Amino acid sequence: MSWKEAFLRQALSDFKVHEELARLQLPSCHELLYLQMAVEKLGKYYLTPNDGSKPVPTHKSIVNGLKHSTSNPATRQKMGFSNHTIYREKIQRICSVAQWLEDLYPTSDDNAPNAKYPWSDGTCDVTAPCDVEFHTQVSLPLLKEFKAFIKGMLRAESTD
Amino acid sequence: MIYSPEEIEAQAKLMAEEAHLNDPDIRTIYFFKADEEVRLLEVTPSVPKSGEMDVFYFRPAPKYGMPAPSGVAMVRPEELHSLSLPKGWGTLEQAKTILSNGRA
């Protein structure tokens, strides 16, 4: 298996875990973390050269991955979009969710909210991700639209 | 795998047309000739400023007119001349412009 195929397989598996976690009504940081991981690996799948070499390490691949996919007629058609305007508008809409997800990656900054590690607001007060309702920070219909689109991309890339 | 120049260029034009239909703000698309894959650089204000030129790679999809693998980089107009092109792609002067000011 190549690096490219392996990233796609792991993205599919992470997305499955995300869907399972979403059913369990656990704190939303857990399902969000797996959604981030799935989308990050899908981005890395696109960043991996076709010659078998490894991708450049980066977390900032979600928004760019979505934008770059607009050059690929195969992805669009496999996802069932025949209308360019609808496809373009959909990507524009869901990019705001992609940006939100990217901004929630854990960083070396201890004060930055994220879905994985506790953070401080700069005082003595520390927040645990499991106490934050992340899913209320974006519009639910938009989040659903984003997830459906990512699932469609994963499916499209898995088929010839 | 090696593809004919005609196959590569036909796929480059198809992808450029697709990109333009999905992003009418694209100003220029450069095509870098290679035997083994299609290489496009899209100049558009609709991508975030990145500080580096990432290439996103697509597998071949012959059923959809894409027999060759492809690599697509996108850059904001103001970053075009300040960022390094992907390794092995050559220079902007060597590239062919297949879309300029929104026209093929």
Image (cartoon, coloured by chain):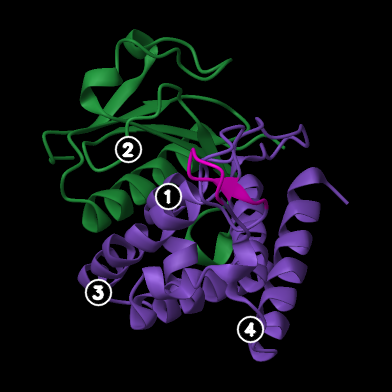
Chain colours: A purple, B green
- Alpha carbon separation for disc pair 3 and 1: 18 Å
User: In which chain is the residue bearing label 3?
Assistant: A
Q: Find disc 4 in the rendering and name its residue.
A: A22
- Label 2 crowd bin: few (<14), some (14–19), many (20+), radius 10 Å: few
Disc 4 is placed on an element classified as helix
Q: Amino acid at mark 3?
A: Ile
- Alpha carbon separation for disc pair 1 and 2: 8 Å
Q: Quadrant of the C terminus of chain B?
A: top left
Q: Find disc 3 in the rendering and name its residue.
A: A86
Q: Is residue A68 left or right of residue B30?
A: right
Q: Amino acid at mark 4?
A: Ala
- Label 3 crowd bin: few (<14), some (14–19), many (20+), radius 10 Å: few
- Alpha carbon separation for disc pair 3 and 4: 28 Å
Mark yes or no: residue B68 visible.
no
Q: Is residue A93 left or right of residue A59?
A: left
Q: Find disc 2 in the rendering and name its residue.
A: B48
- Alpha carbon separation for disc pair 2 and 4: 30 Å
